[in-house]
Image (cartoon, grey):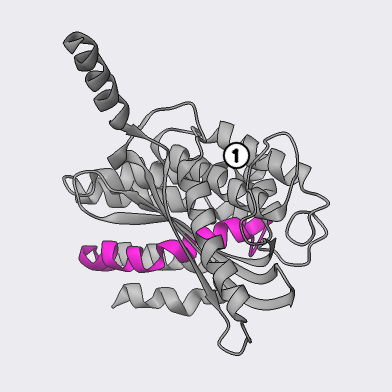
Amino acid sequence: MKYKILILSILTSFGSLFSQELNCEVSIVTNSKLEVTTVDKEVLDQLKQVMQDFMNNTKWTKDNFKMEERLNCNLQFQVSKIPSQGVYEGTMQVQLTRPVFNTSYNTILFKHIDENVTIEYSRNSVVSYAPSEFRDNLTSILAFYAYYMLGLDYDSFSPKGGTPYFNEAFSIVNLAQSGGAGWNNNDPKKKSRYNLIDNTMNQLFEPLRDCYYEYHRKGMDIMYEKYNEGLKAIYDALNKLAPIAQSRPGSVNIMVFVQGKKNELKALYSDATQQEKTDVVNLLKKLDPVNSSQYMEILN
């Protein structure tokens, strides 16, 4: 009997070494001018926990993740309208970070505001995700961002390593064409979920996927030991985005990447030569001309 207990203990300990892929923190805030009933407040509190459990307890890949290997991400659903009971409209801010090798620093992989989010949820509703069908906006939006973030993370560690997860995100968009705003190609907003994944899957945007790998694996991950080599790799990675910016100026994917790196690049280039600072500022102004003045701070 004691041997059975020992074996069970070993298996339990082994299982506890691994966890699901995401470590996602969810928050829900309401517009200060919005009248929120007691019932709605209780429903939103429950919805927050449901969203968090869904992201963190779903098995998204076939890989085993250790606790410390989980992807750290945040979702904030900002409710601006409650048009009817159980229907919540607003925006969702999504952020994903990635640890940098040999440091305690976490770099931003993805920081995005989804401007078209409509979620229907009633108290004590059962939430379940079916990969082969569209059931509701809640599970499809969450699953879309789960797979999209996984794709970016895997891309940052190996060349185009995120392809299987981008394929899943693309499938979700195709299945959700009847789901309303954000899901189809006639959405007037450039920041739609459709545009995010459609661009990612487009051959024109392959240099951006290469950039994710080279910026992080060949640049950020060696900066601690080889600053100059890492800085050059980062510049070369950014330079790969120039043809995309020229062909598709203002594309959401380029804006999300460059804007997410703005403060980081200012810190990275603080010890660079003046010529290196000038070169990267000129490049960033080409990639993101609308916000060109923001990058001038790098020169200081």
The residue type indicated by label 1 comes to: Phe
Q: In the picture, residue 6 is in which quadrant?
A: top left
Residue 173 placement, left or right of 13? right
**Residue 243 percent location from the top left of the image:** 59, 51
In the rendered image, the vertical position of residue 73 relative to residue 146, given as above or below = below
Along the viewing direction, whichever of 35 and 167 lies nearer the viewer = 35
Q: Secondary structure at mark 1?
A: helix
In the rendered image, the vertical position of residue 184 relative to residue 21, given as above or below = below
**Residue 10 percent location from the top left of the image:** 23, 19
Taking the magenta stretch, the answer to whether it contains residue 51 is no
Identify the residue position indicated by label 1 in the image.
166
Residue 195 placement, left or right of 214? right
In the rendered image, the vertical position of residue 133 relative to residue 30, given as above or below = above
Residue 137 placement, left or right of 96? right
Along the viewing direction, whichever of 160 and 143 lies nearer the viewer = 143
Number of marks? 1
Taking the magenta stretch, the answer to whether it contains residue 259 is yes
Is residue 202 visible in the rendered image? The answer is no
Majority secondary structure in the magenta region: helix
Which residue is painted at 60% across and 46% down in the image?
143
Quarter of the picture holding the N terminus: top left
The residue sitting at the front extreme is 1
**Residue 36 percent location from the top left of the image:** 61, 82
Residue 226 placement, left or right of 276? left
**Residue 95 percent location from the top left of the image:** 46, 59
Magenta stretch, residue numbers: 245-274
Along the viewing direction, whichever of 88 and 68 lies nearer the viewer = 88
Q: In the picture, residue 218 is in which quadrant?
A: top left
Which residue is painted at 43% across and 27% down in the image?
63
Label 1 packing within 10 angstroms: few (<14), some (14-19), many (20+): many
Is residue 248 visible in the rendered image? The answer is yes
Which residue is painted at 53% across and 62% down in the image?
46
